């Protein structure tokens, strides 16, 4: 039995033994969430507050504590080494409702002392290192048990004998695994109703290398083409009096784009839109750097907004005024989107039907002339499949395709960059279905980032580094870089088995999670393609740096 199936069976047995109240909490905590997905409360607990609590609770030397956290890569794993039963343990064993009550209290106070007091009481109730470690991981949002949504939903289906398709559909509607588990247990999945304000996974597109390849992929089907925009993929949830914008990382980004929020608030009714936030002026998409300057900022000056104007360009609608549209064909969804935007100033994509290589090439060239990234091809009969990359949507970009890579090490540069971590070793994921994926290095890049970005990355990497030799800092998977290159060749220098020729950083993908980075299999596919003229080039020298595993992380 594979590791996923073993985890599924263990969870199913555990879930089946719980009461409704404990089932709701346990399944939520297994998913790594402190609260229901539609609950906008946050614990607001930093690594500094938690570290202060643990050092005092366990009477630890701060230097010993910090060294252990750095060595293990995160606070939770370090506790397995540092934990000792507190001198004043809780009078009764810690139970799920105790954790829930503690989380409620922690979220309700905004003061350091208040959070510290509730945290101290919660952690003092932990009776084992393992218990303390997992509470810590949930608090810091870094559970990383390998139990992703697929395994968790399959566990609920197995525990209560429900069809997995019904489980998946109800989860998509509810967004909370706790409520889902209780409905499944009581055979009430048909009562699930769609709720706004829980981000859903975005539907993805399969890359195509050339217009010719794309033409073969769409043969005998009806497709439309639309420009592939160079911005931030975003999802807009709106009901009367409330609006939220989520990115691919499932994080809110409203505060960075108040002008976009103002535009969207003018639309009537309630809805869920899929689209892209782009920099925009005078009917023209501006370079991505304009958007990048606004990411993560909560206090924008009028000058910042003026110099980096943004709009939301809609290209899909998934829900409108009580009707779920995800299972409707793209053509129906597009009609609904057009009706919503009729007479409104909001921008939407323009689509054109394509059937041949010539039409696809023409549409691609037109998109590039409009300074957009490339082309999207969509089957007009396609339903919206969250989180899936199939044969319904395709994307065509410039050659060679860029790769989304995870930074695994940062090195001090030379010359004016000698005091900054400006050279970045990057990696992609490798691993089979039942294997824990690991990062394998592909190379190092340093060009393409600004001095301001280098300063930002230097501060980040020094703060999260797991080890360093004074020059090279090993870092956990935290930052995604979009890497462009001219060609790819085989190489024994890097654990990934390939080297990118003239790699350069196209941009920092703050909008992507490390888990969203590309796979080694995709690199191999591009390597074997006809546009890669470096096939068969000689191998390079052996690698120097080890490749990090999935669990090399440091929470702070």
Image: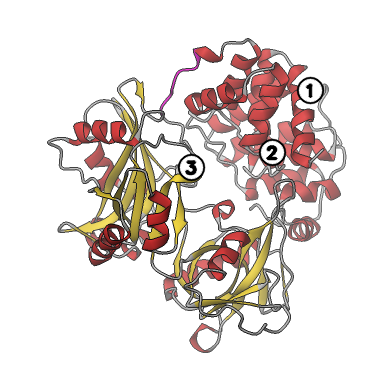
- Density class for disc 3 (Cα within 10 Å; few <14, some 14-19, many ≥20) is some
Task: Using the rendered image of the protein, determine whether residue 295 is visible from the camera's viewpoint.
Answer: no
Residue 12: image quadrant is: top right
The residue at 63%/53% (across/down) is 556
The region drawn magenta spans 191-196
Task: For marks 1 and 3, give the CA distance.
Answer: 30 Å
| Magenta stretch contains residue 342 | no
Q: Secondary structure at mark 1?
A: helix
| Residue behind mark 3 | 250
Q: Secondary structure at mark 3?
A: loop
| Residue behind mark 2 | 147
Q: Nearer the viewer, mark 1 or mark 3?
A: 1
Q: Nearer the viewer, residue 284 or 28?
A: 284
| Residue behind mark 1 | 13
In the image, residue 530 lies at what x, y percent? Answer: 49, 71
The residue at 70%/27% (across/down) is 155
Mark nearer the N terminus (1 vs 2): 1
- Density class for disc 2 (Cα within 10 Å; few <14, some 14-19, many ≥20) is some
Marks 1 & 2, CB-CB < 8 Å contact: no
Secondary structure mainly formed by the magenta segment: loop
């Amino acid at each position: 039995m594979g590791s996923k199936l073993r985890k599924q069976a263990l969870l199913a047995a555990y879930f089946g033994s719980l009461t409704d109240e404990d089932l709701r909490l346990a399944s939520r905590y297994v998913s790594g969430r402190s609260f229901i997905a539609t609950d906008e409360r946050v614990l607001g607990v930093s690594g500094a507050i938690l570290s202060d609590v643990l050092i005092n609770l366990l009477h630890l030397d701060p230097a010993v504590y910090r060294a252990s956290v750095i060595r293990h890569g995160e606070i939770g794993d370090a506790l397995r080494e540092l934990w000792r039963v507190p001198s004043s343990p809780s009078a009764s064993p810690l139970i799920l409702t105790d954790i829930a009550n503690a989380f409620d209290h922690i979220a309700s106070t905004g003061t350091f002392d208040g959070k510290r007091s509730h945290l101290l009481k919660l952690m003092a109730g932990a009776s084992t290192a393992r218990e303390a470690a997992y509470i810590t991981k949930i608090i810091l949002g870094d559970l990383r048990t390998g139990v992703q949504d697929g395994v968790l939903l399959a566990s609920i289906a197995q525990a209560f004998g429900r069809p997995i398709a019904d489980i998946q559909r109800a989860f998509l509607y509810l967004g909370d695994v706790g409520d889902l588990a209780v409905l499944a247990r009581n055979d009430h999945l048909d009562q699930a109703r769609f709720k706004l304000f829980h981000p859903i996974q975005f539907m993805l597109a399969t890359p195509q290398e050339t217009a010719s390849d794309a033409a073969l992929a769409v043969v005998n089907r009806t497709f439309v083409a639309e420009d592939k925009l160079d911005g931030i993929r975003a999802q807009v949830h709106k009901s009367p009096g409330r609006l939220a914008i989520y990115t691919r990382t499932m994080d809110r980004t409203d505060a960075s784009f108040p002008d976009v929020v103002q535009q969207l608030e003018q639309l009537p009714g309630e809805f869920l839109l899929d689209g892209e936030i782009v920099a925009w002026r005078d009917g023209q998409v501006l370079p991505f750097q304009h958007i990048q300057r606004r990411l993560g900022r909560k206090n924008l000056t009028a000058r910042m907004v003026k110099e980096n104007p943004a709009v939301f360009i809609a290209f899909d609608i998934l829900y409108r005024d009580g009707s779920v549209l995800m299972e409707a064909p793209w053509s129906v969804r597009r009609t609904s989107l057009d009706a919503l935007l009729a007479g409104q100033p909001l921008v939407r994509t323009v689509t054109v039907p394509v059937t041949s290589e010539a039409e696809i090439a023409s549409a691609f060239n037109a998109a590039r002339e409009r300074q957009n990234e490339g082309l999207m091809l969509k089957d007009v009969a396609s339903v919206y499949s969250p989180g899936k990359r199939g044969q319904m949507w395709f994307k065509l970009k410039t050659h060679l395709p860029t790769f989304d890579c995870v930074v695994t090490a940062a090195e001090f540069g030379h010359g004016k960059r000698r005091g900054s971590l400006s050279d970045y070793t990057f990696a992609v994921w490798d691993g089979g279905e039942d294997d824990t994926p690991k990062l394998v290095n592909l190379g190092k890049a340093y060009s393409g980032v600004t001095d301001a970005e280098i300063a930002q990355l230097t501060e980040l990497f020094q703060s999260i580094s797991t080890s360093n030799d004074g020059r090279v800092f090993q870092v956990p998977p935290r930052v995604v870089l979009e890497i462009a290159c001219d060609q790819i060749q085989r190489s024994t220098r890097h654990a990934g088995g390939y080297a990118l020729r003239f790699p350069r950083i196209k941009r920092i993908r703050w909008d992507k999670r490390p888990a969203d980075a590309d796979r080694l299999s995709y690199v191999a596919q591009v390597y074997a393609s006809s546009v890669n003229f470096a096939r068969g080039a000689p191998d390079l020298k052996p690698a120097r740096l080890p490749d990090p595993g999935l669990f090399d992380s440091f929470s702070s």
